[in-house]
Image: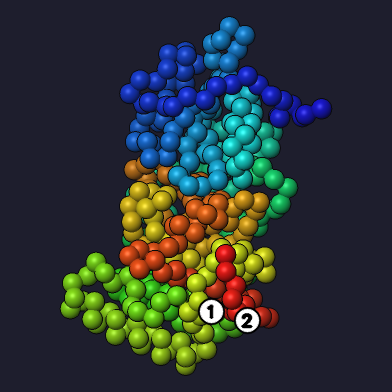
Amino acid sequence: MPSRQDTPVKSTVVPFDPAEPPDRLKRLGHHDVLERWRGVDRSAHAPRIVAVVGDDEDWTAAALVTARPHTAYLKIVDAVGDVPAAVRAVVAHAHDRELAQVKWEGWTVTSEVAAAAGFAPLSPPLAQPEAASGPAAGHVRWLHDEAVDEPPYYAQTTHFTCGAVTALVAQAHAGRLPRESLDRPAELTLWRDATNFPACEPVGLGVAVRRAWPSSPVTVSLDTDRPVLLGHYPQDEQEWRAVLQETSRAEAGRVGVPIDSRHLPMTAIRSALGRREHVLLLVSLAEMQGFDVPHWVLCHGAVPGAVVIEDPWTNTAAGDTWVDAHLLPVPPPSLDAMSTISPDGFRGAVIIHGPERHTTLPPGQDG
């Protein structure tokens, strides 16, 4: 017999149009909650109402759910009415879609109510930019039995320090950096050592990680020998940045950072995660956020059907918060597309190995 928190309920799923919210939703009250739902343009994250339908076909509960495109989760922004029933309906909807998890923003829900619905608390962010908006608390319910060890969440405080932040979070997650040391001076110091002005390209980032933590073996995976991330600069600015990238390659040889020029497949990333290694992966934000900007994320875990990442950046204008970006499951085909960087279709990554091993891709491995 299913537990009460999983007892099926009759439900429906409808798009949420902030300009014309359904009358059945308005009758549930909570006008302050509805105003929050309508306060930002969530259209890029496919906002939907999951509603519980009573015997008279009226709604007895409703939840607003959103999610970044090409990911494997649903996020409950709020639930109103019979909240436990609304959450059961959302979880059932997520199961039907074979997703990896449901998250719940802590705007109105207490930790006790979330726990009763099977949700675990998320550790709050260590830092966020002043302009970021989001709930003070968040909760997660995984839809499988495998545990995912939670790293700290730290949001980049500039538009260009994503690479440095992913490296710092990886080292904190691995126990090689105290969590209290994750702060803005550490973020900017590592960025300054890794930057190609202002971005961090894979070789420079790998070298900076190796210099900062000499006991952490690092492999850079980059399947092109040309300078990268320079196409949007004028020719004269490309030239001096290219010189810096060549300097980084020379430095990689001096400090013992191998550069693997083979394509890094998703199977190799999952294998590295299975060895409890960390993969700093260069992606484009086109799939998840709608604009083709290169960006670093941290791959740190895997569950059935998804790689779990930390994204240090959120799109506040779309209602995107740290709850979306933290413990974010992405299906391997989606991550494969995100990390194929245009226009050359290259893939860049920095693999941070454990101190006891240092491995590269087996010859001929593909996926």
* Circles 1, 2 touching at the beta carbon (< 8 Å): yes
Query: As drawn, is 157 to the left or to the right of 364?
Result: left
**Residue named by callout 2:** 358
Within the image, what quadrant is residue 74 found in? top right
Residue 194 percent location from the top left of the image? 39, 77
Q: Is residue 271 visible?
A: yes
Q: Give the camera-side residue of 184 and 316.
A: 316
Q: Give the camera-side residue of 97 and 365.
A: 365
Q: Give the camera-side residue of 145 and 128.
A: 145
Residue visible at 82% across and 27% down in the picture:
1
Residue 193 percent location from the top left of the image? 39, 79
- Above/below status of 152 relative to 243: above
Mark 2 neighbour density, 10 Å: few (under 14) some (14–19) many (20 or more): some
Q: Amino acid at mark 1?
A: Thr
* Quarter of the figure with the C terminus: bottom right
Label 1 vs 2, first from the N-terminus: 1
Cα distance in 3D space between marks 1 and 2: 8 Å
Q: Amino acid at mark 2?
A: His
- Above/below status of 289 relative to 366: above
Furthest-right residue in this view:
1
Q: Secondary structure at mark 2?
A: loop
**Residue named by callout 1:** 219
Q: Secondary structure at mark 1?
A: strand
Residue 37 percent location from the top left of the image? 41, 30
Q: Is residue 193 visible?
A: no
Mark 1 neighbour density, 10 Å: few (under 14) some (14–19) many (20 or more): many
Residue 11 percent location from the top left of the image? 59, 21
Residue visible at 26% across and 69% down in the picture:
231
